[in-house]
Image (cartoon, grey):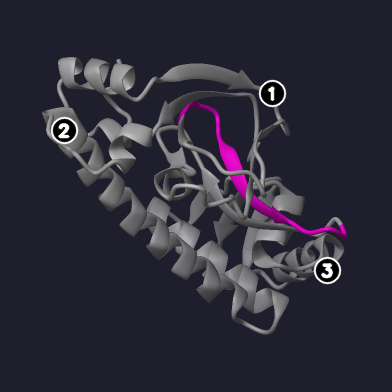
């Protein structure tokens, strides 16, 4: 069980079972748009997405939303906050669709005494995941740095195409989420996408895109 989950990479079935028990693992289900963790509250638990996906969001007092990331099946969230004792979360974690989450309490790892094999492997995997997430955040800054909406869209779609290794691919966001991720207005984004299609740069249907040379 959990053999294809990144946090358990390189672990035997017995290691995984011990890790889930030692970290007080419990599975929970959430409906689309349900808040899983919210900003302003500390957490000792991290989440592992077993099915579905979640979005990492910043929501201000005026109702403005910025999507900072998307975590799909096999990914994790809130691990940094869970490891930093008494650090309140700065973001919300919301179900992007119906999903099933494994919640793990990192209190034991936070104490820094990693004597068992599973503790050492979990710590190493967390380090790798953290490095990957830092790269993803840097990547988003590339997509939001162009001044024009077209520049942001092209930057994002080009990166998505490269990751899939194909000019045709599906993105994990609906139109509003894509706008929030690129930090633009939805109506302006939709208008620009229409212009790009008429210019022969792209084809798209909902969340599926094709880049045209």
CA gap, disc 2 and disc 3? 46 Å
> Residue drawn at (19%, 16%), measured in percent from left and top?
13
Nearer the observer: mark 3 or 1; the answer is 1
Relative depth, front residue between 51 and 162 = 51
Judging by the rendered image, the residue that carries numbered circle 3 is 188
> Residue drawn at (30%, 45%), measured in percent from left and top?
126
Q: Which mark is residue 41?
A: none
Secondary-structure class at tag 1: loop
Residue 55 image position (x, y, % from top left): 61, 44
149 sits to left or right of 129: right
Judging by the rendered image, the residue that carries numbered circle 2 is 10
Question: Where is the N terminus found, in terms of image quarters?
Answer: top left
Secondary-structure class at tag 2: loop
Up-down relation of residue 178 to residue 124 (above or below): below
Secondary-structure class at tag 3: helix
Do labels 2 and 3 touch, CB within 8 Å? Answer: no
CA gap, disc 3 and disc 1? 30 Å
Of labels 3 and 1, earlier in sequence is 1
Judging by the rendered image, the residue that carries numbered circle 1 is 31
Of labels 2 and 1, earlier in sequence is 2
Q: Which residues are magenta?
A: 49-62
**Magenta segment: does it hold 55?**
yes
CA gap, disc 2 and disc 1? 31 Å
Do labels 3 and 1 touch, CB within 8 Å? Answer: no
Count neighbours of disc 1 (C-alpha within 10 A) and say few if under 14, some if 14 to 19, many if 20 or more. Answer: some
Number of numbered discs: 3
Up-down relation of residue 103 to residue 114 (above or below): above
The dominant secondary structure in magenta is strand
Name the quadrant containing residue 93.
top right
**Magenta segment: does it hold 43?**
no
Residue 135 image position (x, y, % from top left): 39, 64
> Residue drawn at (32%, 20%), measured in percent from left and top?
20
């Amino acid at each position: 069980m959990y053999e294809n989950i990144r946090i358990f990479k390189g672990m035997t079935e017995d290691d995984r079972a011990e890790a889930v028990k030692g970290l007080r693992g419990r599975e929970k289900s959430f409906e689309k748009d349900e808040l899983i963790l919210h900003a302003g509250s500390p957490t000792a638990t991290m989440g592992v997405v077993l099915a579905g996906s979640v979005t990492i969001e910043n929501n201000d007092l005026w109702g403005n939303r910025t999507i900072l990331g998307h975590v799909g099946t096999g990914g994790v969230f809130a691990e940094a906050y869970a490891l930093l004792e008494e650090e309140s979360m700065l973001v919300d974690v919301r179900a992007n669709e119906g999903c099933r989450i494994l919640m793990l309490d990192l209190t034991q790892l936070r104490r820094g005494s990693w004597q068992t094999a599973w503790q050492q492997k979990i710590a190493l995997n967390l380090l790798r995941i953290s490095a990957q997430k830092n790269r993803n955040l840097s990547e988003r800054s590339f997509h939001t740095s162009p001044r024009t909406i077209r520049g942001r869209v092209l930057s994002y779609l080009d990166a998505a195409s490269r990751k899939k290794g194909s000019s045709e691919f599906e993105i994990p966001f609906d139109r509003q989420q894509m706008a929030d991720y690129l930090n633009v207005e939805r109506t302006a984004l939709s208008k620009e996408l229409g212009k790009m299609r008429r210019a022969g740069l792209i084809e798209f249907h909902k969340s599926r895109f094709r880049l045209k040379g």
